[in-house]
Image (tube, grey):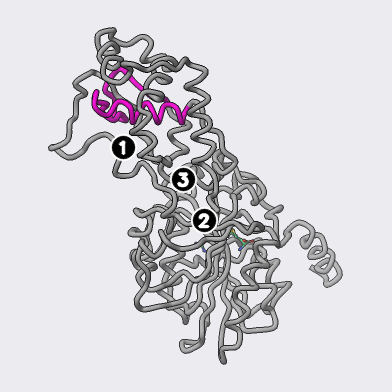
Amino acid sequence: MPNKTVKQFYLLYNRIVSPYQAKHLSKEEKISIGAFYTPPEIVKKTVEYITPYLKNKNFTVVDLSAGAGAFILPFRDYDYRAVDYDYSVINYLRNQLDEDKVIHTNSLLKVKRSKFKIPKDNFLIITGNPPYNDITSVYKKNGKGEFVCDPDLYDNDIGICFLKAFNKLKADIVCVVHPFSYIGKRWNFVRIKDFTSNYKLVKGVLFPSTMFKYTSRTSPFAVMIALYERDEKGMTYDYIENFEFELLNTDQKFILKSYPTTDGYINKYQPRKNSLLKESPIGLYYYSFRDLNSVKRNTTFIAKKHDFSVVVTLEEFYKYAYLHCIRKLLKTEYMWLFGNLSPLVDKEFLERNKAVFVYYALQTSSTLKNFDKEVIDLIKKTYLEGFSLDLEQSKNLILEHFKNLFIIKK
Ligand SMILES: C[S@@+](CC[C@H](N)C(=O)[O-])C[C@H]1O[C@@H](n2cnc3c(N)ncnc32)[C@H](O)[C@@H]1O
């Protein structure tokens, strides 16, 4: 290509590849490589958090999933690496940045500092917004073939593979954007043990996934700007449960411990252990649930045992009635924050007001309306003796309770 044409080509390309929007990719391509570029406001915060560490003598700032370079461009006057396996953005970046510092590769394969030309003793700062998606579904659906990464980095969620890679590179600082659930959910926290036992969270700012353009997920979820420092003592889940997270652009704080959930109180899944009841003595089941989003999405009571059913007993009926009420009545502006957690519950309130939830469920569940009359009579006898509220009053009481429960506490 003659020089002039090359220039014109890049002028056009600059307009197509924007640092903040993957305009050059189709919707399917964006989903398949997780190319949801980060809005400037979020990038700005990471730069702010990284800046104090730039006083270290020899440092390198690295983004292993650089996209169009939004996180790296602010550090162009320092030593940096911008890495991506989307060839079109790499071409663009080579035109914007120092060619030697732009690397086209799979960042999760043969991970070591020398592969990325990072000096072995340099203070390493990792930044960026690694893709997050379930590789099993994404890679199968898009016919992309096998997902390849180092065996010690493997996980079903590609974002978790990236966190493990940061640890493998012994990054001193990790200041990235990732789903809150990676550390907010106890099970995930354990799953990324390699990372959590070597890093300590210093700052965590939460915001809704809807701030990303073109996201296709129907349920918004909490994303986090996280600043971690390498620390050989790592962190415990207890540390995370008591951590004061900030909510972006507000002065509100979010401490997980202040929001008790149904975990350990209401069974979520079908029983696996032999010691647990597999058949319901009253022939009633509830659709299993992973988190609040699935409670809102799925059906509630079911009359037949199912692969995805949880056993409902007479003694625990009120707990599932509570979930049914959440499914029917809960509305909150903080669904993005609570949706990926187990449903919140004020156990004391529920124990004191079993009848309200039971009554509302009996009146509004089609399964229960058509269920074995003897069982329904037994439920009424157990829970509703002396209960005097009507449907409207019960509904209002529950709505008021949810309104006060699913909010950010001061
Ligand atoms: C969520 S986008 C982030 C882009 C950019 N950092 C931003 O936030 O604006 C994720 C990027 O990771 C890249 N990517 C996904 N898997 C990768 C891998 N295994 N190795 C290198 N890059 C990868 C995609 O091509 C995409 O550009």
Does 70 sit left or right of 122 as displayed? right
Amino acid type at mark 2 = Phe
Q: Is residue 324 magenta?
A: yes
Q: Secondary structure at mark 2?
A: strand
Q: Residue at x 67, y 49 (%)?
A: 213
Q: Amino acid at mark 1?
A: Ile
Front residue of 42/83: it is 42
The magenta-colored residue range is 299-327
Q: Which mark is residue 266?
A: 1
Locate residue 43 relative to residue 110 in the image: left or right.
right
Q: Amino acid at mark 3?
A: Asn
Q: Which residue is mark 2?
A: 254
Residue 388 in the image: above or below residue 402 = above
> SS for tag 1?
loop
Name, please, the residue furthest toward the right.
4
Question: Few, some or many C-alpha atoms within 10 Å of disc 1 (few <14, some 14-19, many ≥20)?
Answer: some
Q: Quadrant of ligand 1?
A: bottom right
Q: Are marks 3 and 2 in contact (CB under 8 Å)?
A: no
Residue 244 on image: x %, y %: 50, 62
- Precedes in sequence: disc 1 or disc 2: 2
Q: Can you identify the residue that label 3 sits on? A: 340
